[in-house]
Amino acid sequence: MSLPAHGLYLADAREAEDLTAFLARLIHYDRAAAVRLQAGGSDGPQPHLAVFGRPPSFEVLAIRTARLAAPAQLDITVSAGELLEGIAGAGFTVPDAVTGPPWAGVLPPRGGWHKIPGLPTVEAMREAVAAAVAEFRYRDEALPDEQRIRTERDRIGREIWSRTVGAAPLPLRAVHAAQSLGFLPPGVAVALLGAGSWLRLRTPFGSIAVRMRGLGGLDVTPARG
């Protein structure tokens, strides 16, 4: 991994605000959260930074992109908290690298995505998440005292959040993660994409990627150096 000798600048203060909000939400779920940062490659007309995180319990990857003021080459895993502390105005200091968690070594592919039909409306997905949360609470509270243990509660959670949404193969936990991270406000435009064994729920505020089994061959981007 290449370690930058200086900070980077985002395109404007709004990009910094959006990145700050994303990092704060990740840290809310895990104070020791790490994020993998990537910049460079085929950025197109506007260079950008891709920030990958994994909120615990959702079993998904959250992806937030931010436009950069100038092209940069970067691939590093850092502390989300230290990165958040280093943001000042439209600039930020890249923290020292940390030992990346296992998920940071296997990312979704950069290309080869195609649209997958069957996704319900945003309103329907938000309603499905609310219904699932209510169901989990009801079933959890209905458990006898002797069954109110972590393994039983996890079993109920896996059953509920593994359900798919609409006619699409996307698990409900991916929608829950998108809503929890602020990616799924009412009325937002969404799309479901697939590439190899990955699904990606894409919105203008960020994406949620989930690695599925039975969706074709493994197609991932391995960690470098």
Image (tube, rainbow, N blue to C red):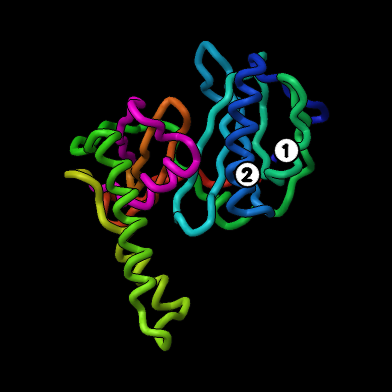
- Check residue 83 in the rendering and tell me which mark sits there, or answer none: 1
User: Residue 117 vs residue 30: left or right?
Assistant: left
Q: Amino acid at mark 1?
A: Leu
| The N terminus lies in quadrant | top right
Instruction: Name which residue lies at 45% across and 34% down.
Output: 183
Labels 2 and 1: the sequence-earlier one: 2
Is residue 78 among what the camera can see?
no
Can residue 101 be found in the magenta stretch?
A: no
Which three-letter amino acid code belongs to the residue tagged 2?
Val
Q: Is residue 139 left or right of residue 70?
A: left
Question: Which quadrant of the rendered structure holds the C terminus?
Answer: top right
The residue positioned farthest toward the top in the image shown:
45
Label 1 CA crowd tier, 10 Å (few <14, some 14–19, many 20+): some
- Front-most of residues 65 and 180: 180
Residue at the spot x=39%, y=48% of the render? 176
| Residue pointed to by mark 2 | 35
Magenta residues (range): 169-195
